[in-house]
Image (spheres, grey):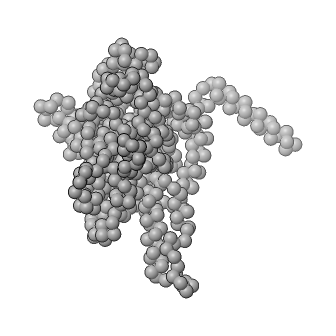
Amino acid sequence: MNEIPTLDVFILTFNAAKHQINTPVFARHLYHAFGQNASRLPELVVVSLQEMAPMAQAFIGSYMLAPYFQRYESAVNLAAAKFVGEEGGQHGQKVYTLLTTRNVGMTGIMLFARSPAAVRGLQAAEVGFGAGDMANKGAVGLRALYEKQGADGRITASTELTFVSAHLEAMEWNLNRRNKNWESIVSGLLFEDPKKFAERPSLHPTHYGSEEPGEDQSLLRRESTEQALHEISIYKPGAHLFVAGDLNYRLSKTSPTPSSVFPSLEPDSSNHYDNFLTRDQLTAEKEAGRTLHGLSEAPIKFPPTYKLSLTSKAKLQADLGRPWDEQNDVDEVGWTWARHRWPGWCDRILFLDMPWWVRANSSRAATMKTTAYDALPAVRSSDHRAVFLRLQVPIVDPDALGPTPAAREREQSANPVDPRIKLPFAVDFRSWEHRDMVKKWESTVGWSMLISQSKQGIVAFVTILLIGLGAWWYRSR
């Protein structure tokens, strides 16, 4: 029997610290990442961004964020064009199509494809859980069907993918808040309005002659609604799930002291960073069943990605210019750990591995295969290092990926229950309504912050206010 076909996916997560990137430098880092353990470009590229822009611009959104997204689009295609040029292709061509950009406040996500026609049914979702549930912290998700085509152009296989970009609560002592943020993602990051499923009648027909629903009908109605809600959650049973972001899990609940021992980059040191992985909050909380339920992660072989303190002299950011000019895009940044924060593997990418019922019923390879999981070099504009994951995703039809009746029955006695079968948290029926309300406040806050940042803005705001008050007074006479 032939092996299950796979989809080559590259996911990158980066906390940009509210700054625009140096595009040529970032492109060179991406170029090397594309070539790590691989000789071809990935078929899909997903970029997860946190603190992608200042809060004012992010809350206003729309055209205010276009310049920030554009730099990443340029970096991806510059890196890919160099890769294609070395393969004998036309150097400088636009290799990837940007299918969509979405954001929730300062958290963004971008989806690129080499074959845009292969991606269909794109959906998006968002949830905020920052101050007042605004999106200074939050998560944004994309879901799409990928159709693999044969040499003759016919569809040979398809699979559904869900990508989540998240930014959880900061600071060492906010461990419980981070776990609550994850609960908000599970319960509120929904790809359709949950209210329409709660209010609709049972998907099962009423028994002939029944005037009042009996116990069996009520059970069927409840099960039908639960399954429908599961389908719109991040844990859709028939879809692959990937979660990337600044998840902010640290090494301790308290800040370091002046005498604290920090991780070392020296391989022979007794304080090498490998020895600090046992203190990683995310690993401990996940094993305890309090966060990132059911998700897997490739082995971490890179040092903590936060908080960096740059040690080399800063230089002006270059324009796009000549992207492969050594004077323009090579920038080695020296850094050390900031002493007031514990270093941590804050920037992570996790995935929902293939379920046991697919592996048990397949004689073919049915596992996620990691090509690379690593961090990009430091850049001058951020105190985080970007992290990337490249993996081969089995292209399994959504119906085949979902649990069988036998799997559902068996999982009822499992501990923990696979999240494809039972959600770890209940769905929030008000999530869409609440988010719409909060977004209105975000826009107001964004414009207020932007206006207050300049003298001209303040003068304009006061002028408009006085004119408005004068018009109100004149009409009320």
Give the quarter of the figure containing the C terminus: top right
Q: Nearer the viewer, residue 2 or 474?
A: 2
Residue 35 in the image: above or below residue 223: above
Question: Residue 51 at x, y = what percent?
Answer: 44, 36
Residue 42, can we see it?
yes
- The answer to whether residue 98 is left or right of residue 378 is right
Q: Quadrant of residue 168?
A: top left
Residue 128 in the image: above or below residue 101: below
Q: Residue at x 44, y 44 (%)?
A: 119
Question: Residue 173 at x, y = what percent?
Answer: 34, 46
Q: Residue at x 17, y 35 (%)?
A: 272
Residue 346, can we see it?
no
Q: Nearer the viewer, residue 418 or 289?
A: 418
Total labels: the figure holds 0
Question: Residue 150 at x, y = what percent?
Answer: 36, 44
Q: Quadrant of residue 199?
A: bottom right
Q: Residue at x 48, y 79 (%)?
A: 217
